[in-house]
Image (tube, helix red, strand yellow):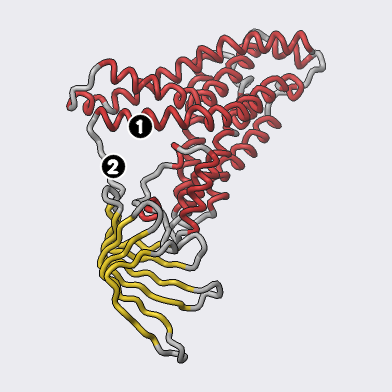
Amino acid sequence: MKTLYKMLILAFLPIFLFSILFFILILQLLDIFANLWRYLAHDATLREILSIAFLYLPKCISYSIPAALLFTISFTLGSLYMNNELIAVLGSGISLYSLIVPFIAIGIILSVGGFIFEDRIVIQTLKQKTDLYRNVVNQTVSYSNSNVTVMSSDMQTVYHVDYYNNKRESLTNVTIIIQDQNGRFESRIDADRGEWNGTNWVLYNCSIYREGTESGVITDHIVGIYDSPELAEPPATFRKTTQDIEEMNRRDALDWVNRLKNAGLPYREALTEYYKKFFFALSPLIVAIIASGVGGRFKRNILLMNLLTSLVIFVIYYVSQMISLILAKSGYLSPLTGAGASFIFFFIIGLFLLKMART
């Protein structure tokens, strides 16, 4: 078996490397031509375009690995079948399940390694690529926000502002409700504006309402400036939610989801994208199982047929994942279900194909 496994791996590796280069080239060309008109409109230099492409390379590798693995395994098994070697192997008493052990092991290794690669390298380079691209094409992003309601992390203070200016870190038309630990009303603050001093919000032209000594009686007084360390909700909480989970590592993404949740902001979409990180990393394992089931089905034109089959399965897998993610973000599925639905479905399909394959 060791000799057979060695033969399979030696046949697998050069095709796999060539396949990765092929899919990387396709992704790079798609990205360049999709943005070519912007590059031309802003007189982008060749050096800037190549720098963007270089920073996009790790993400291309991450995207290419599942497709390349799917093609390589199916092509390798197809070549064995075309040369009647697969029939000889199966006829000698070695089952297909034993034969594909190296491919499944490679799928598991690439899944674990791909997750680490994505978390430690791809995220950083993708963010740099996005920043450089925006700088080259003069694309600006505004984090200012209007009609914002957030809750502090301790769940005791609720802020509502008509407008948050991210550049100045200021609030306009502020209403703040403060509660005690039991959730009972403690005070209300209305202010014309607020400014961040680095540690807390300073409010101007305030009206403060507090519950009086007699039950049901509200007292109020007006102050020019209200500066309290209790109003320490950071400005980032009020920003427009434009951060992309895809550009965050696992730890930062979880922190961002918790921040949105604690602030009372919509977090379903961010949580779905967070779960997607884990299921996307399992793509090599899924395609290894599927490819092992379809690899011996073509005896003629195996290069063309396996390439087409790989592309079709690859596209269907990502389209189904996209649909399930949309359903999760829209509330029709839970975030965990939406992120993992396509993985579970194609895992079952892969097992079915293996069962129906020649053994």
**Mark 2 is on which residue type?**
Val
The number of callouts visible is 2
Where residue 260 appears, x then y in whole percent? 46, 54
CA neighbours of label 1 inside 10 A, class few (<14), some (14 to 19), many (20+): some
Report the front residue among 309 and 181.
181
Q: Quadrant of the C terminus?
A: top right
Report the front residue among 263 and 201.
201
Check the image and name the residue furthest to the right: 93
Residue ID at (67%, 34%) = 351
Residue ID at (29%, 69%) = 191
Where residue 83 appears, x then y in whole percent? 64, 8
Q: Quadrant of the N terminus?
A: top right
Reading the image, the residue beneath label 1 is 130
Instruction: Find numbered disc 2 in the image and state the secondary structure of the residue it sits on.
Output: loop
| The image quarter in which residue 16 lies | top right
Residue ID at (52%, 14%) = 303
Does residue 248 sit above or below 294 in this rendering? below
Does residue 314 sit above or below 179 in this rendering? above
Reading the image, the residue beneath label 2 is 141
CA neighbours of label 2 inside 10 A, class few (<14), some (14 to 19), many (20+): few
Between the C-alphas of marks 1 and 2, the distance is 12 Å
Does residue 317 sit above or below 272 in this rendering? above
Where residue 194 appears, x then y in whole percent? 30, 61
Residue ID at (55%, 75%) = 182
- Image position of 58 (left or right of 171): right
Q: Is residue 293 visible?
A: no
- Image position of 353 (left or right of 180): right
Q: Is residue 183 visible?
A: yes
Does residue 21 sit above or below 238 in this rendering? above
